[in-house]
Image (spheres, rainbow, N blue to C red):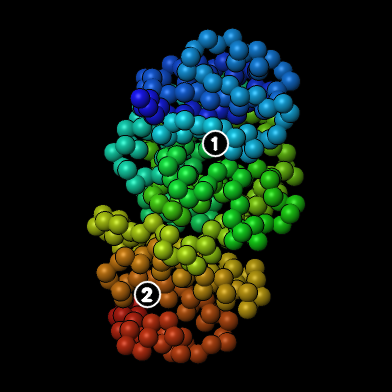
Amino acid sequence: MQQPRLSITVLMAVFNAEKYLSLAIDSILNQTHADFELLIVNDGSTDASGEIISSYKDSRIRCVTNETNLNLCCSLAKGMSLAQGEFIARMDSDDIAHPERIQKQVAVMRACPDLNLLGTNVRWIDENNNVLGRPQCIIDPVDLRWNMFFRNCFNHPTVMIRKSALERNGLNYGTIPEAIAAFLPKELKGIGDEDYLLFGLISLHGKVGNLNETLLDYRIHEKSLTASFREKQNQQTKCIASALRMIYIQHSDNRAPVSNARELLIVEERLPAGLRQIKAISKKMLREFPYPAAQRRIKALCRLQYAILAQSQQNFLKRALVGLSFVLSLRTLRKTDFPTLLKYVFGAKLASIYKRNLRSRRI
């Protein structure tokens, strides 16, 4: 008789983490949700991390040891492939999970079968567990979907991922589709933005979200990433963001649609703010790129916003949002006739309606 599948695999990669490792492990073992395995990948630690892990006799702990240090991305990919749980919850070896973290995330994931990834808020702590701050992550599903095309919107050690979504789409840490690899220079590959890449790809194939609760203490170290490493990681983030936008546009069948009236209402209420946002982005790009390149990128951004609002029934509003920034941005270059652009973006009939609205509302 086949045994029922574990509900949760908590995945933790460890490398020379002896100072805080016991706190991290204890915080998982003390969870109110008890049906889980704690899968620890010891990435060739040379300190006492291995001895600390071995000192625990809890049957829920499963440890895999790399003979040499592979790096975080490879260790997490290895752990993902070995995970037995229906859901995979990430955990770092120096953070502290709140007791109800797993229970609350599992409840949301089971209540929303189409939700593939769920993060939470965190509380920043220092090396002595003093609270440094409580950053707020993006909760609104439309805002989250939009901002994921420009930056990572998830706190990595808080995420819970539906494993079937990974298996169905062939995703894992370090998975680099050809469409994204083309945007990454060789020197930027493997820099360490493995979380943004994976979460971005997951968001292209279904729903993702953030739980508006603080369920983890995230430790800030003095010996954080070096300035040069951060600069390279920032460059990689920009490359990944650009590739995610283009993949979304080119493969519209894979996008997560606006699926219900509530999301539609949110979109329509945010049209003015969305318009200002895309207009500001367009102007910024015009300053940074020569005219032909700027034109291509502005078109891509407008098409992206159009795709996100594609389920909206109010065609005038969605086309206005998409087209206005395109029209106004290119007008600043004084190289294109304004009426021609209106017809190009909206079509002749909608162009006349749009011009009347411009005059009456003074947009």
**Image quarter of the N terminus:** top left
Q: CA distance from mark 2 to mark 1?
A: 46 Å
Whole-percent x, y for residue 199 in the image: 50, 46
Q: Is residue 67 left or right of residue 61?
A: right
Q: Amino acid at mark 2?
A: Ala
In the image, 124 versus 109, the foreground residue is 109
Kindly state the secondary structure of the residue where label 2 is placed: helix
Whole-percent x, y for residue 61 in the image: 51, 18
Label ID, residue 81: 1
Task: Judge the density around disc 1: few (<14), some (14-19), many (≥20) Cα neighbours within 10 Å.
Answer: few
Residue at 63% in and 34% down? 75
Up the image or down, 232 lies above or below 345; here it is: above
Kindly state the secondary structure of the residue where label 1 is placed: helix
Residue at 52% in and 29% down? 11
Task: Judge the density around disc 2: few (<14), some (14-19), many (≥20) Cα neighbours within 10 Å.
Answer: many
Up the image or down, 62 lies above or below 252; here it is: above
**Image quarter of the C terminus:** bottom left
Q: Is residue 144 left or right of residue 46?
A: left
Q: Quadrant of residue 276?
A: bottom left
Q: Amino acid at mark 1?
A: Ser
Whole-percent x, y for residue 91 in the image: 52, 29
Residue at 27% in and 71% down? 314
Circle 2 or circle 1, nearest the eye: 1
Say whether disc 2 or disc 1 marks the residue closer to the N-terminus. Answer: 1
Task: Name the residue beneath numbered marker 2.
Answer: 320
Q: Is residue 55 visible?
A: yes
Q: Is residue 138 visible?
A: no
The answer to whether marks 2 and 1 mark residues whose Cβ atoms lie closer than 8 Å is no
